[in-house]
Amino acid sequence: MKVASLFCGCGGSDLGLEGGFEYIGKKYSRLPFKVVYALDNDVKAVATYNINFKLPATLASIKDIDPSSIPDHDVLVGGFPCQSFSTVNPNKNPFDERAGLYKDMAKILKIKQPKAFIAENVKGMMTLHKGKIFENVTKEFEKQGYKLNHLLINAADFGIPQKRPRVFIVGIRKDLGFQYQFPQNPVDKDNWVGLRAVIDSLVPSDPRYYFSEKAVIGMRNAKNNMKRGLAQDLESPCLTVTSHLAKVSLNSRDPVLLVDPKKDLYRRFTPLEAARIQSFPDDFKFVGSEADAYRQIGNAIPPVVMWHIAKALSKQLTNS
């Protein structure tokens, strides 16, 4: 089945869709999907995509693309930009230009009419403005002729050492006569994978990953109502890794590691650790600076989560 991938980023969703990779000792088999078109407007993310996939991604804004120029496909995938819907930033505008990009995805659905689509976004989209934004998004997709189902998925329930809640919306073209059913969680909370599975050593490979003494002092002097030094338990999944890991702070919601409690030695994740936390295999390469890599990793859809969603979709489309 042919796939068109919008907002493809570095390729997390597409790796999961196609399968054929290994992650912390488990093989994720090849799935019956082939990406025939990929699009993103991030130069470094597209460069990363193009060294990891045979099909080169198109570097352009979705607003500049004629939908009729996109190859015919069976499934449309798009994790449309989520910054406008995030509950972390109180100054975000949920009605800015990025917040309307789902309409461009809907326009492609209207013209190309694939059998199914998969959309992904942050948890906040479901609750902002008392759910009105989420209602607008789903109605726009339904108008194009699709029966929808949605679910808030935690990456930790799929064997990933990260508590990452994201809403997935899957639509099936109405004439196919069925509604998509999400796969059951393969892992229950009592058996979540801990960080230890992807952290080789608490002591970093390079001392520059340590927070400075000044940063630690700033954390100690912070107000009591602030989030401070969120050191992660190696036996549990960590908090969500974000796109700004290069500028991670000890006075924030960002997950960090405590190397030595007696010396107050804290550090941030290395790019390799962050990629592992997002379920990228170790042979996946990232183009650009470390800051570029962190941004690409934090913005990605975890490949393992997408693999499970895509596997269920392939079976249901085949059975229909």
Image: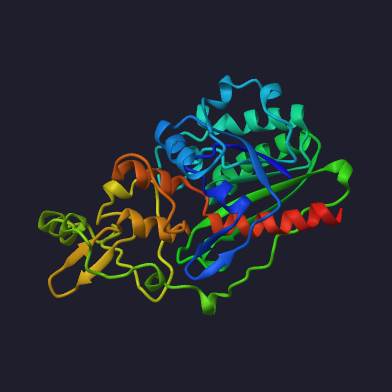
Q: In which quarter of the image is residue 251?
A: bottom left
Quarter holding the N terminus? top right
Depth check: give the residue in front, 41 or 148. Answer: 41
Against 2, residue 240 (above or below) is below
Residue displayed at 29% across by 67% down: 231
Q: In which quarter of the image is residue 75?
A: top right
Residue 320 visible in the displayed image? yes
Say left or right for 239 vs 64.
Answer: left
Task: Give x and y (percent) for residue 306.
Answer: 60, 54
Residue displayed at 27% across by 58% down: 268
Against 27, residue 319 (above or below) is above
Say left or right for 17 vs 211.
Answer: right
Depth check: give the residue in front, 219 or 206. Answer: 206
Task: Give x and y (percent) for residue 318.
Answer: 82, 54
Say left or right for 91 vs 37.
Answer: left
Return the residue found at the far front. 54
Task: Give x and y (percent) for residue 219.
Answer: 19, 58
**Callout count:** 0
Task: Give x and y (percent) for residue 233.
Answer: 35, 73
Q: In which quarter of the image is residue 7?
A: top right
